[in-house]
Image: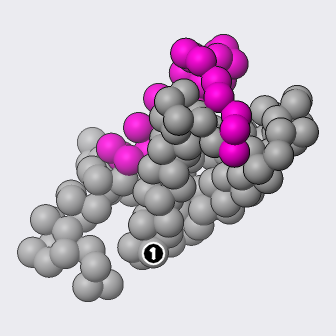
Amino acid sequence: MNLNLPLTARVAAAGCLATSGVIHAQLYLHGYRTIPGVGPAFLLQASGALAVALLLLLTATVVPRLIAAGLALGALGGFAASRTIGIFGFIEYGLQPAPQALISVLVEIATLGLLMIATAREGSGKGRLIWSR
């Protein structure tokens, strides 16, 4: 079996990023839209994640990977901030809302790991970095 690991990792990363987008959209529609500052951030995260997930499926270039990594890091940063210092005066606790909070954190971490695998394996197999494409 000849498995194209970079392609497989990129497709899996797109799936994880899309899952994060769907979770943020669901939470936006079910109450977060009424939270000042947080609501628009959830809508932006959902829209961006779904659009970039599609781009990851359509192209192997580095730009969608960097944007995907930024979206995942931003969501993780927002999650951490909302549980520590708060965001726009909004603070959450633990892994609430359940199960969306835990799933979101896991798929965002997975997105970053899969993007690293795709980029490292693709670059190492050709003797050059992926950025040279």
Say which quarter of the image contains residue 21. top right
Task: Judge whether 125 appears above or below 3 on screen.
Answer: below
Front residue of 46 and 133: 46
Q: Residue, x 14% and y 78% (percent of image)?
A: 128
Task: Judge whether 79 appears above or below 95 on screen.
Answer: below
Residue 74 makes an appearance in the image: yes
| Image quarter (top left, top right, bottom left or bottom right) of the C terminus | bottom left
| Image quarter (top left, top right, bottom left or bottom right) of the N terminus | top left
Residue 40: % across, % down: 79, 53
Task: Judge whether 84 appears above or below 33 on screen.
Answer: above
SS at mark 1 in the image: helix
Say which quarter of the image contains residue 118. bottom left
Query: Which residues are the magenta region?
Result: 88-114
Count of marks, rendered view: 1
Q: Residue, x 69% and y 19% (percent of image)?
A: 97
* Direction from residue 65 to residue 5 in the image, left or right: left
Front residue of 41 and 18: 41
Front residue of 80 and 27: 80
Q: Residue, x 13% and y 65% (percent of image)?
A: 124
Residue 3: % across, % down: 30, 47
Q: Residue, x 64% and y 17% (percent of image)?
A: 96
Name the residue beneath numbered marker 1. Answer: 63
Residue 102: % across, % down: 54, 21
Q: Type of residue at label 1?
A: Val
